[in-house]
Image (cartoon, coloured by chain):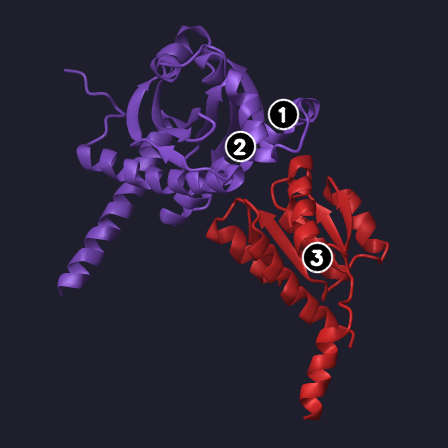
Chain colours: A purple, B red
Amino acid sequence: MKVDPGELTEIEQDALAEIANMGVSRAASSLRQMVGEQVLLSVPSVRIVTREAAAILVERNNPKRLVAVQQSFEGPFAGRALLIFPEAQSLELVRSIVGDEHSLEDIIDLEQEALAETGNIILNGCLATIANVLHRTMRMSLPSVVRGDGAALFEVDGAASRAQFVLFLYIDFNIKKCDVHGFIALLMDLPSIAALKAIVHDFISAIEKQQSGHVG
Amino acid sequence: MADKLAGRLAVRSPEMQYKVLIVDDSKLARMVMASAFRRIRPDWTLVETANADDALVAVSGGVVDIALIDFNMPGIDGLELAASIRKTHPAMPVAVVSANVQNEIIGRARELNAGFIPKPLTDEALAAFLSGAVLRLKKAAP
C-alpha cells in the first residue's frame, strides 16, 4: 500500500486546524472592524489534496467567477494565502468597507485598490498570528488581485500541477448583513508540509510540557 | 493653587497643530487614516506620500513633525524608511502602521524607537499614539 508522503496524523490535523483557527479568527475580527458587521466563520478544514481537487473544492456552491487577493509567504515553510469570494460580490464588499457615502463610480474606481488593501490586512493578520503562535518569522509579499475560476486561482495548469499535492486549509466566512460570503485558503507544497509538520510537532510538545509542568 | 491655575490655563490654551506625514502605497489606507484624523485631530495638517522615496523628500523638507508609515510597501519597506528617518531626525515621533502584527516586526519597530499601530486602524490606537507624540514634541520644544 502506498503511503501518501503528506499524510497527516489526527493530532497534526487537529493542531493545524487549531493554529489556523487562531489566525483566521484574527482575520475575522479585522474584517468585522472594517465592515462594521458581524462576520461568521465555519469550522476550519485541513486536507492534503491535489491542486485540482482544491480548485474544485472552492468552486463548490460558488459561481465560477471568483476574485481573490493573494499573498505569498515564506519562512520556515512557504505557500500562498488567498482571500476568495464570488466576483459578483466584490463591489458589495468594497462598498461595505468604504462606506455608503461614496458613489458607485468611486467604488468601481476604488475596487482593485480596496480589495488589495483589505486582503493585505486580513491575510497579514492571519499569517502574522500563525507565525507568532509558532514562534517563527514569515515574510509576506505585496498583495495582488486575481480573477478567474478555482483552477486559475490555484495555478492549475498542465497535468503536473494538477496532480501536485498541496496542504489546503480553508475557512468560510459570512458577513451577516450584506450577505457577502467567501473564504480564506492557505496553500502549501509538499516540502513545506514536511517543514510545517516538524514545527507543529514542536508546538504540540511545548503544550505537552506545559501540561506536565502544571501537574508537577 | 498656582499650579492648578497653570493647569487650567494650559487646558484652555489652543492645542498645537502638527504636520503629519502619512506614507502608504494604498490609497484606501491613506483615506482611512485621513478620515480618522478628521475625527481625532481635525486641525492638523496631513501630507500623504505613496512611497518611501517621496516620504524622505518630505521629511528632509523639514516641515514634518510626526510620521505614520505603512510596513508592506514596494521598494523600501516601512521599517527601512523609519530607520532612515531616525538617522536625521532622532526625536521625531514615528509609528509603523501594519496588519503584520508579528512579534518580530513590532520588536524591530521598538528597536528604532518607533511606535506600532495595528491595522485595521482604530481611532483609539491612533489617538493613543498621537497623545504620546504630542507629549514628546512638547518636551523637545517647550
Reading the image, the residue beneath label 1 is A111
| Side of A161 where B22 appears, left or right | right
> Height in image: A47 above or below A77?
above
Reading the image, the residue beneath label 2 is A119
CA gap, disc 3 to disc 1?
28 Å
CA gap, disc 2 to disc 1?
12 Å
Question: Dot 2: what SS?
Answer: helix
| Side of A214 where A88 appears, left or right | right
Question: Dot 3: what SS?
Answer: loop
Chain of the residue where label 2 is placed in the rendered structure: A
Q: How many numbered tags mark residues here?
A: 3
Depth order, front residue of A146/A177: A177
Mark 2: few/some/many CA within 10 Å (<14, 14-19, 20+): many
Q: What residue type is labelled 3?
A: Arg
On the image, the x and y values in percent for residue A175 come to 44, 31
Identified at 62% across, 63% down, the residue is B113
Tell me whether marks 3 and 2 sit on the same chain. no
> Height in image: B7 above or below B79?
below
Q: Quadrant of residue A60?
A: top left
For the C terminus of chain B, the image quarter is bottom right
For the N terminus of chain B, the image quarter is bottom right
Depth order, front residue of A209/A124: A124
Determine contact: label 3, label 1, CB under 8 Å.
no
Mark 3: few/some/many CA within 10 Å (<14, 14-19, 20+): some
Determine contact: label 2, label 1, CB under 8 Å.
no
Q: For the residues carrying marks 3 and 2, which lies nearer the camera in this image?
A: 3
Question: Visible in this render: residue B23?
Answer: yes
On the image, the x and y values in percent for residue B50 come to 73, 39
Mark 1: few/some/many CA within 10 Å (<14, 14-19, 20+): some
Q: What residue type is labelled 2?
A: Gly
